[in-house]
Image: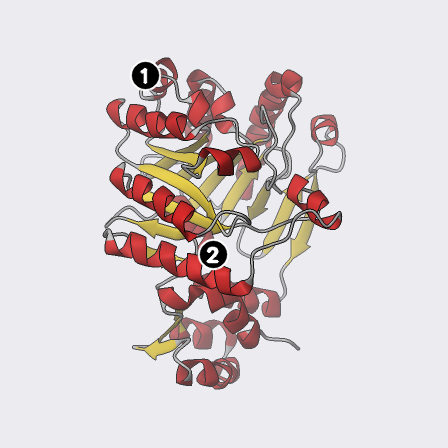
Amino acid sequence: MAGLYLHIPFCKRICAYCDFFKSADLRRTEEVAAAMHDELEREAGFLPAEGLRTIYFGGGTPSLLAPEQLEEFIAHAAELFDCPALEECTVEANPDDLTPDYLRRLARTRVDRLSIGIQSFDDAELRLMNRRHTADAARSAVRRAQEAGFGNVTVDLIFGVPGFGAETLARSLRETVALGVQHVSAYHLTVEPGTAFGRRMARGAFAPVAEQVSEEEFLLVHRTLTDAGFEHYEVSNFAQAGRRAVHNSAYWSGAPYLGIGPAAHSFDGRCRRWAAADIGRYLAGGDRYETERLTERDRYNETVMTALRTADGLDTETIGRRFGAQRLEALTEAARPWIDAGDATLRDGRLAIPPERFLLSDAVIAALFWES
C-alpha cells in the first residue's frame, strides 16, 4: 500500500545544520497550503489504486499549521484515496509549538504519531544548532504530548556535534529513555554546503568530528538505546517492540508514495519526480516536476541501498527473481569479503549488516552496487 507525504516548507527559525527546503517567510503559508490542496486533488492518480497506508507531515515545521488545517489535509486525502486501512498519521513538531491547547486540538484529529525535533537536551548545544527551544521546553513538550493521549511519540536527536562529546550525548540519551517514548531517530550531524554550519566550515571556523569520535558516539547511541529495549532497525532509527515507523519503513522497502508541496518527492516504483524547491515557482505552476525514470541498474542499486540500511537486510531470493541469477551471483561474490570480516551476514537467504556495524553501511553498500 502507498504513503502520502506533505511537505510544509516553513520555519520560524532556520537551524544551523538543516539542508531541507524551507523558508522563514511565513506570509505565504496559507497560499502554499491552498496550492497543496490543489496539487493533492490534481495528482491523486499518481498512486496505484490500492489504498493509502500512511500520511506523513514533514518539513520545515508542520506544527506551524493549526491542527484543524492538518485535519483538512487528512480529510481531503480520505476523499481521494481508499483510507480504511490507514495505519499511521505522523506530524513532525517543534517542542515550542506543542502547547496544551495545540495538543488538545491535535488529539481531536486523526494524527496518531508525533515526531518531536528535540536534537539535544543540552542548552548550549541547542544554541549552537540555532534551535528555538530549550531543554526544559523539550521535556515539557514530550510530557504534554503523552498527557494529551499520544502514545506513539518519536524523539529526534543529533550526535557527532563538534565541541560536545560523549558525556553530553549520554545525558541526552538518558533523558530520552527516561521520558518513555516509543521511537528515537538519532542522526549523525552532516555538514552541508548551503547551511550555516557549511558556511562556517568554508571559512575554517567549523569542522566535523573525527572519524573515531563518530564511531564512539554511534556505538554509545546503539548500546544505550538497545540496552533500554529499543530495536535498532534502521541506520538512524530505534523502536520499542511493534513501534517501527510505518511510513519511513515503506520508503526502505520500495513502496510507492506521493509527495505534495514544494520540493516534495514522489515514487511509483519505476519513476521518481520532485516539485520545484522554490515557493514562487511552486505557486506559479508551470513546469511542475522534474522526473527521473529508473533503469534496471538504478532499481537494483536502490533495492540494495535501502534494504541494507535496515536490520531486516536484503532478501537474496528477491534479487535473483527480479534481476537474474547472474546479478545475484555478483552480489554474493562482492559481499563475501564483508561477510568474512564480520561486517555483514548471510543467513536464511538474507544479506544484512549487523546494527552495531551500521556506521559502515555506506562502504558496504557501495561495494555491492551494480557499476556497469
Residue at label 1?
A: 104
177 left or right of 209 in image: left
At x 49% / y 86%, what residue is drawn?
Answer: 333
First in sequence, mark 1 or 2: give its number.
1
Q: Position of residue 195 (x, y in %)?
A: 67, 41
Please say if 188 is above or below 149: below
Please say if 324 is above or below 111: below
The residue lying toward the viewer, choosing from 10 and 155, is 155
Residue at label 2?
A: 254
Instruction: Identify the amino acid type marked 2.
Output: Gly
Q: Quadrant of residue 99?
A: top left
The quadrant of the rendering that contains the C terminus is bottom right
Q: Can residue 170 be seen by looking at this rendering?
A: yes
Q: State the CA–CA distance, disc 1 to disc 2.
A: 35 Å
Q: Which mark is residue 166?
A: none
Q: Position of residue 308 (x, y in %)?
A: 44, 66
At x 52% / y 26%, what residue is drawn?
Answer: 132
Instruction: Identify the amino acid type marked 1.
Output: Arg
Is there CB contact under 8 Å for labels 1 and 2? no
The residue lying toward the viewer, choosing from 180 and 128, is 128
- Give the structural element (helix, strand or loop) at label 2: loop
| Number of numbered callouts drawn | 2
Please say if 359 is above or below 227: below
Q: Position of residue 211 (x, y in %)?
A: 54, 64
